[in-house]
Amino acid sequence: MASILPAKMNSRKAVSGELGKQLLDVITSGMYSDPRMAIREYIQNAVDSIDLAHFQGLFGNAIPYVQITLDGRERAITIEDNGVGISVKDIDDRLGSLGCSSKIGTSQRGFRGIGRLGGLAYCDVLRFETRQTICDAVQIVEWNGQALRDQISHLSNQEQLGDAVRRIATIGSRRAKPDLDPTRFFRVHMVNVHQFHADLLMNVKTLREYLSQTAPVAYKIDEFPFSAQIEQHLAKIPGYRSYNILLNNKNVFRPYNVEITTREGLTDRINDVEFVECFSRQGSLLCKGWFAQTGFLSALPPHVEMRGIRIRQGNIAVGDEYFLKDRFTESRFATWHIGELHVTHELKLNARRDGFEESAEYEDFLEWASVLCRRLSSVCRQSSNDRSIKQNISRMVIGIERQLSIPFFVDKEHANGFIEATEKQVLRLRQLLPEAGIKDRRTLETFGERLTKIKNRPVFLNSILDGRILRRKDNRQILIELCKKILSINHGSDISELLMQIVGPYLKNQKVVE
C-alpha cells in the first residue's frame, strides 16, 4: 500500500517571522468599534501613572488629575495627567515600540503596549509629550496618522512593520520653552481630529456621558446617597480607586442618582441597594458588586445613562449595559436593572477591553452571573405580573363603577342578569386584591352597598317612561329615532347586524333592498 505520509519537508523555516505594515492598521483603526474607546485607553494609562506616583510618594499636597480638553475650533483633543511621566532614557522603549509593555505581570490596568496608538486612526498627528522632573527637557514623540494611511493604502508595497514605524514616528524632539509645562506630566495631543461617527470625539455632551459610564470616576454623593455603602463594599477590590477626571475643566462623575424617568412620563426610584460577591471554585475573590432595588416598572430607555448591570475592572467599564444580556432568561431584562460588578484581575481582559479571555476563573464568574441574572429575571417577571394584576384591577374597578351607574333595567330578566354578572366581577376583584398586595377594602364595601341597593330597589324602564311624550309619536318614528341614536354613537362594522336585530321583527315579510 502506498504511503500517504508527506515527503520530507524542506529544512527551511516554515514561518519567516516577517511582520507586515498592515498590522499598524489592525492595531489602530481595527481595534475599536467606538472612537471614544481611544480616550478610555489614554485615561487608563493616565490613572496607572497616577497610581505609580502615589506609590512613590510624589504628590505631597498636589492633587492628582486627568484633564481632557476638547478644542472645537482647532479640532484637537488633549489628555494630560500629573502621574510619574516618562524618563528621557525610557522614551524610545515606551513610546516608540509596539506590543511591549512594562506593565505585564503587575497590578496595573494596561499590559499589551498597544492602547497608546488608539487615537492614531482618528487624527492626522498623534503627539506624546512628557517629562519626569523640572530638570528634564520635555520629550516629544509624534506619530503621523496621515502618513500611516498613505502607507497602508499602498498594499503592493510589502514594507515591514519596523520600516513603516520609522517612516511615521518621530522620537526624541524637545520642547523649546519647557517652563510653560508642569513639573511632571504626560500629555497626549490628537491634532486635527477627523469628523465621523456623528463626531462623537468632539461632542462634549456625548463624551461626558461616555466617560461617566466608563472612566474610573467617583459617585456624586449629593445625588446618590448609597455611595458611602458601595465604596465601603468595593474597597477591598484590587485596583478599585476613583480619580479626579475633568472634561473641559469640569469634573466627571458616575451617572447614578435616585430618581429615574423611565418612559411616557413614568417615574421610578432607587429605594435601596443589594450587595453581592463571587468566588472561584478555589476560593479566590472574582468580583464584588451591587444592584439597585427599584420598582422594576419596565426596561429603562437609552437616555437613562445608569441602566444595566455594568462590568468593571480597575473601576473602568468592560463592555456596556448588554454585557450580561445572554445570562438573563430574556435578554430584554438586561436593561431593567441598575448596578455594577467589579471583577478582580483573576479575569484577564481581551485586547479590545469589551470582554475577557477564556479561563477557568472566567467560567466560574459566568456560572455565578447566570444564577444572579436568573434571580434578577424572576424579579422582573414578578414585577411585570404584579403590574398586570394591578392594571386588571384598575380596569375592573372602572368597569364595575360604570356598570353600577346604570340608571334603569329594561325588565326583571335584564336586572337579574346584570346583578349576577356584577357579583361575579366583584368576587373576582376580591380574589385579585390580595395577590396585588392591596389591603384597602373600601372599594369592595362601596360596590357591595350599591349592589344591595340595586337588588332591593331595581328601577325598570317601564316605570320611568313619560307617556305624554310617547303619545305624541307613533311607533315608526320611535324606531327611526332609536336607530339614528344608535348610529350616532356606534359606527362599527357590526352595526348593520345590531340594527337588524332591533328592527327586524317589525319589517315587512319581503327581501330588504341592499
Image (cartoon, grey):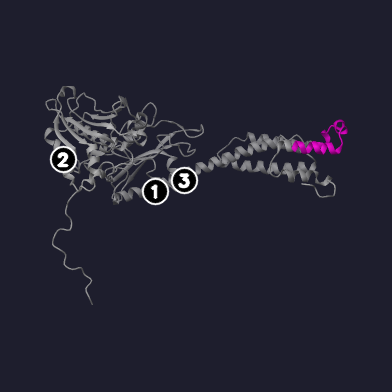
Q: Specify the segment rendered in magenta.
A: 460-486
- Residue corresponding to mark 2: 166
> Mark 2 or mark 3, which has the lower sequence index?
2
Categorize mark 1 by other alpha carbons within 10 Å: few (<14), some (14-19), many (20+): some
Tell me, yes or no, whether the highlighted magenta stretch contains residue 216.
no
SS type, badge 1? helix
Give, as a three-letter code, the residue at label 3: Ser
Q: Give coordinates of residue 171: x percent, y percent.
A: 15, 35
Label 2 – label 3 distance at C-alpha = 58 Å
Residue 501, image x, y percentages:
77, 46
* Residue that numbered label 1 is attached to: 370
Q: Nearer the viewer, mark 1 or mark 2?
A: 2
Q: What secondary structure is found at the residue carrying circle 3? A: helix
Q: Amino acid at mark 1?
A: Ser
Answer left or right for 62 relative to 388: left
- Whole-percent x and y of residue 31? 28, 43
Q: Could you tell me what secondary structure mostly forms the magenta stretch?
A: helix
Mark in the foreground, 2 or 3: 2
Q: What is the C-alpha distance between the residues marked 1 and 3?
A: 12 Å
